[in-house]
Amino acid sequence: MTSKIKSSSRLTAKAARTFSRRTLIKHAIGVGAIATGGPWIVRDAFSSSGKVDVLCWTGYLPEAFLKDFEKSTGIKTNYITLGSNEELINKMKASKGRGYDVITPTVHRKGQWIDLKLTQPWDLKKIPNLKNVEATFRKPSETWIWDGGQHHLPHIWGTEAISYRKDLFQTEYGKLSFGDLWLPGVKGKVQGRPHSMMAGIGRYLADIGKLPPFENAYKDEDSMRGIWDEITSFAIEHKPWIKSFWNDHDTQKSNFLQNGCVIGQTWDGPAIELMKEGRPVQYLAPKEGAFAWLDGLSMPIGAKHKEQAHEFVNAIYTAKAGAQMANATGYNAAVSGVTALLDAKTKAAFESAYPGDALDRLWWWPDEPNWYAEIRAEYRDQLIAA
């Protein structure tokens, strides 16, 4: 398993070096004309009726896409939202993999899902539109191969970086740092998700030479504890800076609009939604590089509507569907040809969030085995309880 995890990390890191929105622009004309219209292939009476139960991140399935999918296939989507990988894993463990046909785990959680054995392989022959997905994103998902097949397909990529109220805090690309969350002027006005905010501290301290490279924390338990002991000490000392912890999409927005937060470590989607609404919020990659992730599509072992699940996934892999999602949320589709279909506000927000060499500096979350996730939870709980 160790070799598989390392292989996945290398592939994901390679994706960070080779992918940018410019990649999509290059493919927009050549591939977009084919990908935009489908095909959404309906093969038999079973897959052209009924429903599909999807447990997916908030905002990932816009109403326009769901209406188009039902009109084209006759399949109704029961869309249940979730806010974290931990919530997803807990739901699947509690139900023993039943109750849903499609779920959306993040690619770097592979080590945990191998051990859970709660997913089943996709029949790739039933997903012809997979060819529309950028090869950069197909490769990390292809490391999820066990028990005779591939258990993960790419869906949406995004980042976690710094958002701030630009009417109350001023900075610029190349100057902004994860360390800015701990400046004296923002004490009591910071928001973040506990465990990833602590990872941001680790990368900040490594960047200024006070810790080894944060990647070293994934080598083994001793290396992790040596690094996370220092992270936790720093985080607890600076807990008075934290106004609010978040663990879902909508809380990040309300923290800026209603709860008095001025700056925070957030996902790109919620902040870009606010930017497009004209709110005084800016999302920007820090000089250390934004955290990057790839969410995917998996089928639980207890899926009841397998044919409909395959039709659903196939429908996602068109430029039109990708643009519907990106225009609605600010996240980024894995399919080619999307850029040509984005609205002006979405394009402008993306360029504002990732200026200069920001896309070349993305820092992809490494694969997380169970031991890492369990120990990290210990340190997270220490911060929360402090």
Image (cartoon, helix red, strand yellow):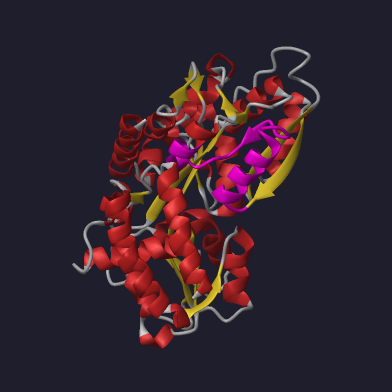
**Residue 214: where, in percent of width, then height?**
28, 56
Residue at the (39%, 33%) spot, across then down: 140
Q: Residue furthest top?
A: 44
**Residue sitting at 40 percent across and 48 percent down?**
372
Q: Does the rendering let one see residue 161?
A: no
Is 193 located above or below residue 296 in the figure? below
Number of numbered markers: 0
Q: Is residue 262 left or right of residue 126?
A: left
Q: Closest to the observer: 237 or 313?
A: 237
| As drawn, 77 above or below 178 | above
Residue situated furthest right in the rendering: 50
Q: Is residue 164 above or below residue 286?
A: below
Side of 77 where 126 appears, left or right: left
Question: Which stretch did the figure color magenta?
Answer: 83-112
* 134, 117: nearer the viewer: 117
Q: Report if residue 99 lies within the magenta region.
A: yes
Residue at point 55%, 74% (across, down): 244
Q: Is residue 298 depicted above or below 326 in this figure?
A: above
Viewer-nearest residue: 236 or 201: 236
Outermost residue to the front: 222
Is residue 89 a member of the stretch shown in magenta? Answer: yes
Tell me if residue 28 can be seen.
yes
Image x and y of residue 205, in percent:
27, 68
Give x and y (percent) for residue 58. 64, 51
Q: Residue at x 37, y 34 (%)?
A: 136
Q: Is residue 97 left or right of residue 112?
A: right
- Quarter holding the N terminus is top left
Q: Position of residue 190 (x, y in %)?
A: 48, 76
Residue projecting furthest to the left = 209
Q: Quadrant of residue 233?
A: bottom left
Q: Is residue 100 or residue 48 the one in the foreground?
A: 100
